[in-house]
Image (cartoon, helix red, strand yellow):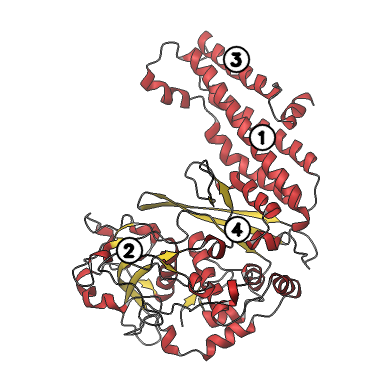
Amino acid sequence: MPVISLKGEAADLSLVEVLQQAQELSGLFCATPGEGVALFEYLLALCYASDTFPSSDEEWAHWVAQEHRLDEVEKWLVRESADDWDLFHAERPLGQNSQLRQQFDEDATGPAQLVIERVGDYVQLFDHHHLEHPVPLSAAAAFRALLTQHHYGLAGRARISGKMLGPKLTNLAAGRLQGRIRVVVQGRTLADTLRLNLYPPAGGKVGHFNHSWNSGISRRDFKTKPPGRPTSGPADLHSSLGRSVLLGPVPAAEGRPVLVDRVLIGAGELLDLDPGRDHDDAVLSRMLNGHRKPLWPSPTRALWREAHALYTAATRETRGLFGRLRHLEFPYEGGGPPCVLWAVGLIANKTVAATWTEGHFPYAPSQGQELCDASRRGSEIAEYVARALERAAYAAWKVAYPNPKPTDRKAQMARFDARRELWPAAKEPFMRLLDETARGGDVDLGLRDYAGELRAQAEEFLRNRLDAQQRDEKGMLARARAEQRFQADMADTKAPAELREERQR
């Protein structure tokens, strides 16, 4: 049985042990946010496959309020055939495609190819020495990386020959969660989190669970590109095989863990997703062309700067996860918000993974509108202070470089621009504002304190940038112009009221 690591545990736990202890465990512990989401997706699929899910929104609310037991999932898994859950089965390897075996010896590489953060570009046409190193992964780590590939794998060309199974084997499609923000509602325990994110399936149909490419439904071939197949239900959706993968185990000595030293990756399933059925958690944003699409990860904006999009969905959406969540009365008592909105996305540079972006945003349905107001206004304040720093940098630059070359402007301006320091520093007071609001704090008072802290930070960062100037007449004038520009922006009638109030104190 595959194993996964859990928070506070020194050793890996099997899937059965995870489900047995879900009521006591605080959550999953994973090397990356994407791996955590992939494992959680798998647990959701197990719940649906075992017929453990609410049949209506009303029953869902009852399940959450009464902390409905999830014992049936674990009992179902114990009754399952061991062959269906064998990671190294000769014909039906769990989550994999045994058809790749006929070219495994020729095309397989080291296990780094399985890990999104280590693979680099998948393409076979480049020289990737790091993929040849056979430093093995544990079976547990390989299983987690396998699931992450299924959900977040990037588009591109695979490092595999298509001469046996077909040329389309090399065409990797983007995973279903690649390119959008996945939102998971986290409760106090893993069981709470599962209950909060289980949803009534459309028509009551859970669909099939994808044990292996080589069992269950008839899947695509690799001769031609087929149309995407509709999902048969949430068990299918959350266990879909976005990659064809085959793992090569190292013979293990008795009592030693099984290791994986070779892997092979090719194209996987193509899904035709139904936004109304398959995007239960999506935070929809309006585009210029009028179409709505799920919130996507940005390489230039930290995820906390989009918190207002999550809270807006939580106060306005009438369907899906947020539609259910906004009407929920939590049974929890004591300090802290009853749940957290965990948002995760993968930022990529074309076909190469760059970094994960994530945010943990406190949420209490009773404070939904207050959180929406605090996050929106807090973001506006931060944006305004950042623009003021940019304008101050421009004022200093105009004095320090009276006759600049156009090509030098960007580098010269960067000397005075303190936004690089502001954005990382602004996250902590913003999150503190949200936490206090979720606990019932006064929004207006919290925003005034938050604005004052941001302004003080910005003044310090600007001062540090200007301290590098020469102490001659030009340097002093550049400093004076920059500080005057910043203070004028803080007092401007267009400035957020909280910043103007802070200046008048």
Q: Which residue is mark 2?
A: 113
Answer yes or no: is residue 160 visible.
yes
Q: Which mark is residue 342?
A: 4
Report the Cα–Cα distance between label 3 and label 4: 44 Å
Q: Position of residue 156 (x, y in %)?
A: 32, 56
Residue 156 or residue 56, whichever sits in front = 56
Report the Cα–Cα distance between label 3 and label 2: 55 Å
N-terminal of the pair, mark 3 or mark 4, is 4
Q: Which residue is mark 1?
A: 381
Q: In the rendered structure, which amino acid carries the disc numbered 1?
A: Ile
Q: Position of residue 399 (x, y in %)?
A: 50, 12
Pointers 3 and 4 in contact (C-beta within 8 Å): no
Report the Cα–Cα distance between label 1 and label 2: 43 Å
Label 2 crowd (10 A; few <14 / some 14-19 / many >=20): many
Q: Residue at x 55, y 71 (%)?
A: 6
Pointers 4 and 2 in contact (C-beta within 8 Å): no
Camera-near label (1 vs 2) is: 1
Q: Is residue 4 above or below residue 327?
A: below
